[in-house]
Image (cartoon, coloured by chain):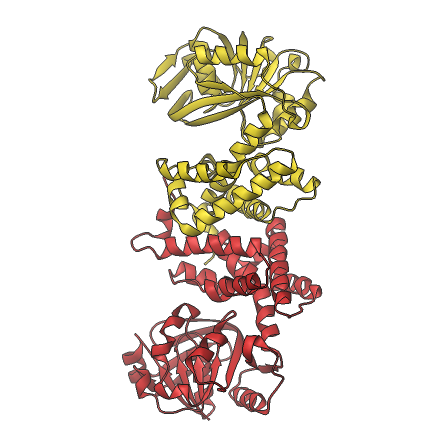
Chain colours: A red, B yellow
């Protein structure tokens, strides 16, 4: 199978490099690191062992990418308005789309960009990784992937033979991969964690450990999980309450973790608010469900994000005097 | 009338000094500024004109304060657990209590410290003032007072002759003073502003102007006002919706303002969370009303307050690395 990677960053660069190392042909779309990567390839610093790919198929424009069997989409969701220009022209008719992006609502966006009947898969990455110098990716922890097939409105699609084949490729590339018959459930369950911990980590400037250790924030995280649980239920997705407790317990035993949203905030990158909060709130609202806490978290984060993105205003200047 | 002032800070020091200047005998309880004020008196820098009181009745302990007609209580509400030791011994039987503190639930606390049937008044201060060097108070803006009589559960008490007499003293002292027949209504209406703007100013590190200018925060401030409106209604206090709109409009035309809670946060002082959020949430909950947004704001502020109060952790260290 031949792969294209749209967005060669902490996620796309890491997984794409693993696939290439296992013998697959992989084409990488790059932006500002293009010249460097074309010349020097990719370097992965990983807790599972560092490795180099001295030569990769690097492309500065999607028009140059040959027809591939699978297109991995690994941009930040905040860049998804660029997708209509970033996807290679042949994508509308050919190839499987596999998005590795966070949150909910990505697959329906992709479905609008391609012809009806195209296979769209969603991948949930459980990984701590970030970019370093040009062409360098640092993989600190975890790394597993869960993939599932997308059907209209996240209707469960079961496990198809295609999904099993894909999973085997990834496993051969050294990525622990699970398949899910119900992508919607998997995405909602991931939101159960992302909504409270990504969101509050920015508001409180706190690690996961600090948040679960504080009784008020622990209670609030659980309250927000209940909001997610109700929102999921409004879409016909049942998340057992035991999942909430289990997730709080496992977060308490994790090493202190700076969430990806907090990392984006500290790096003055736009926050993935639409995929994590806006879309789930909107689909629940269409079913008549008002989520006061999630909405408030969204409003607060939008304010913080806008102030953070304001040119010439750095974080310390945010404090009025 | 002879006055005692418990808590000679930005509020008690300012109003007490005005009363003394108008010819009344005023006794001030002081803590760390006692020696300085006993020697040098009080100095008020005010937008209405600076003035000095070279000699004041300063007391380091409440036992030394002679019997007075009125006791002004002007501590931060976060210190109210000290009141049972800070009030002069004769307070239980004699004198009118007038609390100038913020929020809701102060008067019922006072009622527990004195004998039944004692007159307890509540005062709402609309003032921007803060402490400077020892014995110095800076009064930047506003300064008016609204006073009302407290009855069990904030039942409306009407306007008593005593209230009118008190108001006249304050007016003679140069303080614009209004009387309210319904202290509960006045306190809830003040919360309508304090809950969103005090609370969010800390969470967002923003001035009032920044908050009303941002569409999401403007909407959130209004949402929080609706919570306060509902909480008030659960106590039989009707706040017209037009009050919400009017308050948002007038906040938009105010000069950019750093709220008192934000100022306390920046000065690493404990936040007045119980009076502004905890008590209103609790009385509403007892009527079966769950306030998701106010509760979330309370939880977030409790976390931030606790981190802020943690010895050896300064605000910048709050960002994990």
- Name the spot of residue A272 as percent of width and height, x first: 45, 65
Q: Position of residue B191 (x, y in %)?
A: 53, 35
| Quarter where residue B256 is shown | top left
Mark yes or no: residue A267 visible.
yes
Horizontal side, residue B234 vs residue A174: left or right? right
Instruction: Using residue A109 as the reference point, say whether residue A255 is left or right of it.
Output: right
Residue drawn 42% across and 45% down? B205
Whether residue B133 appears in this view of the structure is: no
User: Looking at the image, which residue is at 41% across and 40% down?
Assistant: B208
Q: Establish if B261 lies above or below A272.
A: above
Query: In this rendering, would A318 be left or right of B70?
Result: left
Image quadrant where residue B44 sits = top left
At 64% from the left and 22% from the top, the residue drawn is B85
Front-most of B193 and A309?
B193
Residue A150 spot, x, y in % from top left: 54, 80
> Which of the pair B233/B57 is nearer the observer?
B233
Question: Which residue is nearer to you in this view: A25 or B245?
Answer: B245
């Amino acid at each position: 199978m031949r792969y294209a990677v749209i967005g060669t960053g902490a996620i796309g660069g890491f997984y794409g490099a693993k696939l290439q190392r296992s013998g697959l042909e992989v084409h990488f779309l790059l932006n500002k690191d293009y010249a460097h990567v074309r010349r020097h390839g990719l370097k992965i610093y990983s807790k599972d062992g560092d490795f180099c790919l001295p030569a990769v198929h690097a492309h500065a424009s999607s028009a140059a990418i040959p027809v591939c069997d699978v297109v991995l989409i690994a941009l930040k969701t905040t860049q998804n308005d660029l997708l209509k220009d970033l996807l290679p022209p042949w994508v509308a008719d050919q190839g499987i789309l596999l998005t590795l992006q966070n949150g909910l609502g990505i697959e329906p966006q992709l479905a609008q960009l391609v012809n009806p009947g195209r296979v769209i898969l969603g991948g949930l990455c459980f990984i701590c990784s970030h970019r370093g110098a040009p062409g360098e990716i640092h993989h600190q922890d975890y790394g597993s992937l869960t993939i599932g097939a997308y059907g209209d409105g996240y209707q469960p699609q079961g496990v198809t033979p295609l999904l099993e084949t894909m999973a085997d490729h990834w496993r051969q590339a050294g990525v622990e991969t699970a398949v899910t018959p119900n992508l919607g459930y998997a995405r909602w369950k991931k939101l159960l964690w992302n909504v409270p911990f990504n969101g509050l980590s920015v508001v409180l400037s706190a690690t996961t450990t600090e948040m679960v250790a504080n009784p008020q924030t622990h209670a609030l995280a659980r309250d927000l999980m209940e909001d997610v649980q109700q929102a999921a239920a409004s879409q016909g997705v049942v998340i057992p309450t035991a999942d909430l407790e289990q997730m709080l317990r496992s977060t308490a035993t994790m090493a202190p973790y700076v969430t990806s949203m907090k990392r984006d905030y500290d790096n003055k990158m736009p926050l993935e608010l639409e995929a994590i909060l806006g879309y789930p709130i909107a689909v629940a609202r269409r079913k008549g469900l008002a989520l006061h806490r999630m909405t408030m978290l969204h409003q607060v984060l939008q304010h913080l994000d806008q102030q953070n993105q304001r040119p010439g205003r750095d974080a310390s200047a945010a404090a009025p005097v």
